[in-house]
Image (spheres, rainbow, N blue to C red):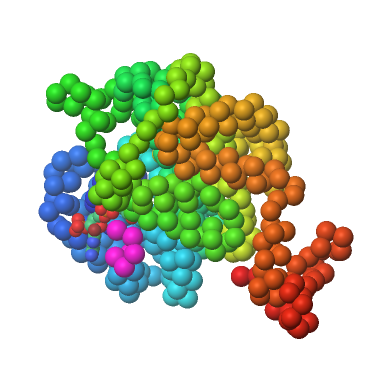
């Protein structure tokens, strides 16, 4: 009997919690999982006595849904998603909707939207952020794909999403792979935020000699100000957590980071778009370097760390680290928005940048007070080219700049690695530099490869070639950009 509002495939941590969240909001959900025992355990446990229906085949799942049928996949991204879509297509009717809520690559979502449209089916590729807790009590949801599907899915998604004030942290992002693209950039920003906080932590621990408890107090205090965010909050919590022997657990955790690919995808996309997403990409590389634990141990023996004996004024330096973190965070979001603007241009998406900030305002891992300012900036100037051109962020950067440099000088003198904090400052210095060093690059390119150059005393687009060593001809290389 057709009765469920939506079907969900994939009863791992995200799937189960989303189903419970939907049921709590009055929706009936039919569920299916490859391994039958997970379905049985779920139904016997938390899903018992709720509007949740177990099914044990895709036919049974599809037949239990109201039309237009809505089937959401919460499974491992990649081939598994394609395999389920292939099995679902013959079971569905025109106008039915397949939703992929996993961390899929946006180009896959673009392809799936087009392939399913040809078959008369509607596809939504949506980012879901917030981990287990978010899925259960209100995630940030970033849907894109075939816009014709949105009205049918909207009531469910906006009910279960986190709320920023009264606004749901979920709205239509754009066509094709736009939803998964925005989720990818969200994850990239998450990599950046986490790396920045970790660098600030190391400066406190190693540079200033603070204990884990002292660091906890600093982060807890910072969480009351402009840095107020979920990631600062959990950092404070982590620092106070003790292992069974009463020592801080953080000191027992191996310094080798894992990653599941979304940061790497963001970096790759930035290279493809030609956008200097330096901070996020450095954060991915920092994880790669961290993973070389054995090599680092060997290198540490060859190049022992000799901390500078200079004694820093702790209060002064903590303020400097705070300001460096804040300024770098502004740069990271600036770069992330530059990337989304370029992607929207390239793919023909109408991205609502203020709306994206609102979607990230609650529920997700990067939620913060700060995102409210980004929303305000784009609401005031929808055509805003760059966050650094908004007066609030201009003021914040100018206020922080001297301390940002002070913190980095301290890091360099102490030999403490700060790739994300440093790359943010390098970007800022490059971005605000009206006359940079690329004249030398162009001269070199023309010298060895006749790649031509533009002159400051000629209109843009006029290209010149010089026979630098008086032995070449007048032929220049074709001028094109890749
Ligand atoms: P996982 O990413 O661990 O996926 C587990 C689900 O995929 C299970 O239902 C499993 O079925 C199914 N599955 C796998 Br694995 N291989 C399969 C195959 N060959 N055929 C059929 N089913 C298969 O679960 P998750 O952590 O809940 O994440 C779900 C999606 O949401 C992923 O794309 C993830 O990247 C994304 N996401 C995760 C989080 C998070 O915090 N975990 C946050 C945001 C987004 P089985 O039970 O039979 O093995």
Image label count: 0
Q: Which quarter of the rendered image does ligand 1 occupy?
A: bottom left
Q: Residue at x 69, y 37 (%)?
A: 390
Looking at the rendering, the stretch of residues picked out in magenta corresponds to: 76-81
Q: Nearer the viewer, residue 433 or 266?
A: 433
Q: Quadrant of residue 135?
A: top left
Q: Residue at x 35, y 36 (%)?
A: 305
Q: Residue at x 18, y 27 (%)?
A: 243
Name the quarter where the N terminus is drawn: bottom left
Q: Residue at x 71, y 45 (%)?
A: 433
Residue 53 x, y percent position in the rendering: 23, 51
Q: Is residue 197 above or below residue 66?
A: above
Q: Is residue 277 visible?
A: yes
Q: Quadrant of residue 93?
A: bottom left
Residue 150 x, y percent position in the rendering: 50, 55
Name the quarter where the C terminus is drawn: bottom right
Q: Nearer the viewer, residue 305 or 50?
A: 305
Residue 136 x, y percent position in the rendering: 32, 39
Residue 154 x, y percent position in the rendering: 47, 49
Q: Nearer the viewer, residue 392 or 152?
A: 392
Q: Quadrant of residue 304?
A: top left
Answer with left or right where residue 78 lies relative to residue 348: left
Q: Nearer the viewer, residue 215 or 382?
A: 215
Please say whether residue 363 is one of the residues in the magenta stretch.
no
Please say whether residue 78 is one of the residues in the magenta stretch.
yes
Q: Is residue 68 visible?
A: no
Answer with left or right where residue 25 lies relative to residue 413: left
Q: Is residue 184 above or below residue 241?
A: below
């Amino acid at each position: 009997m057709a009765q469920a509002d939506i079907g969900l495939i994939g009863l791992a941590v995200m799937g189960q919690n989303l189903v419970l969240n939907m049921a709590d909001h009055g929706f009936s959900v039919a569920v299916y999982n490859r391994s039958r025992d997970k379905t049985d355990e779920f139904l016997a446990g938390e899903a018992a006595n709720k509007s949740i229906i177990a099914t044990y085949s895709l036919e049974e799942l599809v037949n239990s849904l109201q039309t237009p049928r809505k089937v959401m996949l919460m499974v491992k991204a990649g081939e598994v998603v394609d395999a389920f879509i292939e099995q679902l297509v013959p079971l569905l009717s025109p106008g039915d909707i397949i939703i992929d809520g996993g961390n899929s690559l946006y180009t896959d979502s673009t392809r799936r939207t087009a392939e399913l449209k040809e078959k008369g089916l509607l596809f939504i590729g949506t980012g879901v952020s917030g981990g287990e807790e978010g899925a259960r009590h209100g995630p940030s949801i970033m849907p894109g794909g075939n816009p014709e599907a949105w009205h049918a899915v909207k009531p469910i998604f906006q009910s279960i999403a986190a709320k920023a004030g009264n606004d749901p942290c979920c709205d239509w992002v754009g066509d094709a792979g736009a939803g998964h693209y925005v989720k990818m950039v969200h994850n990239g920003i998450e990599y950046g935020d986490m790396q920045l906080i970790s660098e600030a932590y190391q400066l406190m621990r190693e540079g200033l000699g603070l204990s884990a408890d002292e660091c906890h107090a600093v982060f807890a205090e910072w969480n009351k100000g402009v840095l107020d965010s979920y990631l600062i909050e959990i950092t404070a919590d982590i620092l106070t957590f003790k292992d069974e022997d009463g020592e801080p657990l953080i000191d027992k955790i191996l310094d080798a980071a894992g990653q599941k690919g979304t940061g790497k995808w963001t970096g790759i996309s930035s290279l493809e778009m030609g956008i200097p997403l330096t901070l996020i990409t450095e954060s991915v590389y920092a994880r790669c370097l961290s993973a070389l634990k054995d090599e680092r141990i060997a290198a540490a023996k060859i190049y022992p760390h000799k901390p500078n004996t200079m004694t820093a004024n702790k209060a002064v330096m903590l303020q400097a680290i705070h300001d460096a973190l804040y300024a770098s965070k502004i740069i990271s979001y600036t770069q992330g928005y530059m990337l989304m603007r370029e992607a929207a241009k390239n793919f023909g998406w109408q991205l609502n940048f203020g709306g994206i900030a609102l979607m990230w305002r609650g529920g997700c891992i990067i939620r913060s007070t700060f995102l409210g300012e980004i929303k305000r900036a784009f609401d005031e100037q929808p055509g805003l080219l760059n966050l650094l051109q908004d007066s609030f962020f201009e003021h914040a950067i100018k206020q922080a700049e001297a301390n940002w440099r002070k913190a980095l000088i301290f890091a360099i003198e102490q030999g403490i690695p700060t790739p994300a904090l440093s790359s943010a400052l390098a970007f800022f210095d490059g971005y605000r530099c009206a006359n940079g060093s690329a004249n030398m690059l162009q001269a070199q390119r023309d010298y060895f490869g006749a790649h031509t150059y533009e002159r400051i005393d000629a209109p843009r687009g006029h290209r010149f070639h010089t026979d630098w060593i008086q032995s070449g001809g007048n032929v220049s290389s074709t001028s094109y950009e890749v």
